[in-house]
Amino acid sequence: MEMKIAERIDRLGTETAFAVSAEAAVRAATGAKVYPFHLGDINLPTPQNIVDAAMKAIRDGKTGYCPNGGIPALREALAADVSASHGVTYGMENVAIQPGGKPVIGKFILALMNPGDEVLYPNPGYPIYESQIEFHGGTAVPYSYREGKDNFVIDVDAIERSITPRTRLLIVNDLQNPMGAEATAEERARLAELAVRHDLYVLLDEAYFELRFEGTSASLVREPGMQERSVLLYTFSKKFAMTGWRLGAAIAPKPVADVIAKLNVNDESCSNHFVQYGALAGLQGSMDGPRAICAALKERRDVCVDLLNRIPGVRCYRPSATFYLFPNVTGLMARLGLDDYEEFRRLILTETGVSFCSRLHFGRPLKGEEERYIRFAYSGIDVDQIREGLEKLRAFVASRIG
Ligand code: PLP
């Protein structure tokens, strides 16, 4: 008997980077060498104080259900931490703990979007935005970025042009995956002015807010009129190298935080109880661990950018935050006589073992796109392997195009 899957599932997208991972794993299982640049996972250990606190919590019996919105001590500590880093004031009533940052995306949409509403979202961008907007019956309206002098630049004009009376939500991923782009103070002011003028609710996906190598991060939530209309996506995954622990939070005006906690009741009941004690130790303990994670990633970034820029037909910025690079490979693909992203990706994987995602994995390509981009994540590969892999890539390109 074939089971009929519900029609709504036709509208559900996925994160195809996991499929690239699976393909790379199959290849590695045959004994072939793979250089994993495809997934934003981290091969650095979670800081020991977090591990110890979580283990102690298990031993202390923190193994039953806990409050739906999270343990009060963690909600309080996170509110204080984000208030200090963002220059605004939050209390524990604004925090709804989640099993990761990702669930905030769907819950933000469920809480604030009605079917038929239009939602502006970044494309290329994290693919779950497009998936969740359409799954819940909204219209996904993409906005893009263009190449600037030192990094990609958010196209605020395009956002403004796309706003209609049906636009209800705006999703902003400042410190952006996959491009590593970051808004300037002027762009933040313009985005805030647009959100206020058009009465938009805003998801601020700040998964990489504290994963930066130079300068300081500034949040859109600090702009006038923004705190009361914004939901912040916070995650422990990146800063504390805790991707598999699954812990994050929605930080929002109290009525929205309450709705999100109610969605928790219906979904997972609560986030993992003892993990929250680990996260609490992370927030309140020594910052040596996160600093070491950032230092390791910065070294990888520099090696990766330098080597990529030595390959003919490749042009790559050096973003100050995130652990992603989004090199322009238009010239390289043209010289190899390739137009198809998947053909290019598979050729490089087969010939060199270098595994990466392409623009195709970050939302439906937009009409008129001519430049070609791939995404390198350097969070899951050590410096010596970055060197070895990118040297193989350079040698392969040289053998093909001289
Ligand atoms: N938002 C962005 C832009 C991301 O890149 C990620 C992870 O890659 C997430 C959210 C969610 O991460 P997590 O669910 O591990 O917190």
Image (spheres, rainbow, N blue to C red):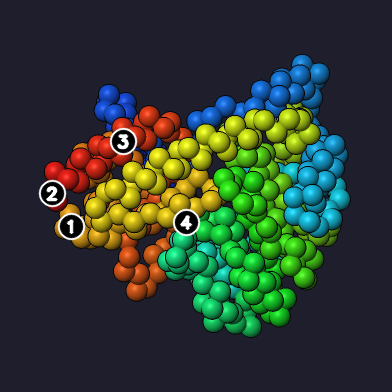
Give the mark nearer the N terminus: 1 vs 3: 1
Mark 4–mark 1 Cα distance, whole angstroms, equals: 23 Å
As shown in the figure, which amino acid type bears the numbered disc 2? Gly
Task: Kindly indicate whether the residue at mark 4 contacts the one at mark 2 (C-beta within 8 angstroms).
Answer: no
Q: Which residue is mark 1?
A: 335
Residue 64, quarter of the rendered image: top right
Query: Which kind of residue does numbered mark 3 sit on?
Result: Gly
Q: Which residue matches tag 2?
A: 402
Specify the amino acid type for callout 4: Met
At which x and y percent is residue 236? 66, 40
Vertically, is 284 above or below 15? above
Of the image marks 4 and 3, the number of the one nearer the N terminus: 4
In the image, 387 versus 220, the foreground residue is 387
Find residue 144 and report its horizontal and vertical position in percent: 48, 68
**Mark 2 or mark 4: whose residue is earlier in sequence:** 4
Q: Are marks 2 and 1 in contact (CB under 8 Å)?
A: no
Q: Position of residue 169 (x, y in %)?
A: 64, 69
Indicate the quadrant where residue 165 lies: bottom right
Secondary structure at badge 3 equals helix
Mark earlier in primary sequence (3, 2): 3
Circle number at residue 389 = 3
Q: Nearer the viewer, residue 347 or 371?
A: 371
CA gap, disc 4 to disc 3?
Answer: 21 Å
Q: CA distance from mark 3 to mark 2?
A: 19 Å
**Who's the residue at 68% across and 48% down the image?**
234
From the viewer's perspective, is residue 216 above or below residue 229? above
In the shown orientation, is residue 171 left or right of residue 222? Answer: left
The residue to which callout 4 is attached is: 179
Query: What residue is drawn where x is 45% and y is 52%?
Result: 318
Instruction: Determine the CA span between mark 1 and mark 3.
Output: 20 Å
C-alpha gap between disc 2 and disc 1: 10 Å
